Each structure stands twice: as C-alpha cells, then as structure tokens.
Image: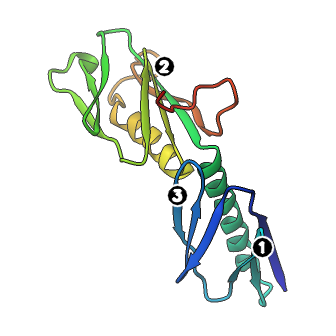
Amino acid sequence: MLKNEVAIPDGVEIRKENGEISVKGTRGENRRFLKAPHIKVEIKGNTISFTSDTERKKIKAVMGTWAANLRNMIDGVSKGWTGEVKLVYSHFPVKIKKEDKYLVIENFLGERSSRRIPVPDDLDLEIKQNTIVVSGTDKERVGQMLAMIEQKVRTKGFDRRVFQDGCYITKKPHIPEEGENDGEKA
C-alpha cells in the first residue's frame, strides 16, 4: 500500500469537493482538480494523505506530484510566490507601464506600436525601473506570467550573443524572504 502525507500548517484551511482541493489562507485561495481512479485523498486533522492499494511506479509518481503541488499551494496562500523579469535594452529607450489590466512595453526596438501583455486579476505586478516583479499565490501562474513577458519581448532574426535587447527572467518563482519586497501594496 502506497501512502504520501502532507502536513497542514496553522492558519491554512483545506477542503475537498468532488475531486477539487481548495486551500485557503491569509493571502487568498488556490484550487486544483486532483482526481485519479486508484488514488484516495483523505483529510484527517492537520494532515492530508494520498493512499493507493496498487503499488505501481506511475501511481507513486502521481502521488508525489500531487503532494508537491499541495505543498506549493499551501506555501502560496500562507507566504506567496514572487518572480522577477529584467528588461535589457541598448538601442532604443524603452518604457514599461501598467495600464488597466495590461503590462505595456513601448518603443521596444523603436517600434511604433506597443506590446501589450494581459495581466490576470489574481497576480500583482510591480515595476521598479527596468525590473518587473510578479507576485501571487499560485506558483504556476506566476511562472507562466514571467514566461509570457519573456516571450512577448523576444527578438527574432538576431544573434542573441550580440543583440541582447529583450526581457529575461532573473528570479524564478520563489518564496520572498523577510527583507525582500514581496509585491504587496502598502
């Protein structure tokens, strides 16, 4: 019998409804659909356990993935996730700003039209000079936003060793430390 347990810290509430796990904490709420035919999910006291009667490698791998996802969800609703993208330019002065629900990058490579990237409601965006700080409760969504910014400002047809204009991820999604600004609005 396979078993994998995750401890639930104080201040975090976990509910299970029809295969969907919802984790609620001080920073918000995360939801994820976790359902497989051979894996049972049980919440007992301050632990959540994944159990299975079949001892196959694939089942064990899925249980490990679910446990890691659940730990990331717990960290997100209690501490939050933060990542950074840095804008590098040398040819044309570039402006970054946030308009409504979009991140707008103007004058990239001297283009007349601006590049607009939609920002989801559950993510916070902070602009510090040439650095864009993305923070939220879901590690995957923070990482996807960082990747979307990097992809939107990619230069094609140039040698990247010479022509280095663009956006580059400098810090992958991580839990902010005590002294680090975590993107909260004061």
- Answer with mark 2 or mark 1, whichever residue precedes in sequence: 1
Q: Are marks 1 and 3 in contact (CB under 8 Å)?
A: no
* Figure quadrant of residue 100: top left
Disc 1 target residue: 45
In this picture, residue 114 sits left or right of residue 71: left
Residue 90 is situated, as x and y percent measured from the top left of the image, at 38, 9
Mark 1 or 3: in front is 1
Q: Marks 2 and 3, how far apart in space?
A: 42 Å
Mark 1: amino acid: Gly
**Circle 2 Cα neighbour tier, 10 Å, few/some/many (<14 / 14–19 / ≥20):** few
Q: Marks 2 and 1, how far apart in space?
A: 55 Å
Q: Is residue 77 above or below residue 97?
A: below
- Report the colour scheme: rainbow
In this picture, residue 7 sits left or right of residue 95: right
| Residue 29's disc number | 3
Mark 3: amino acid: Glu
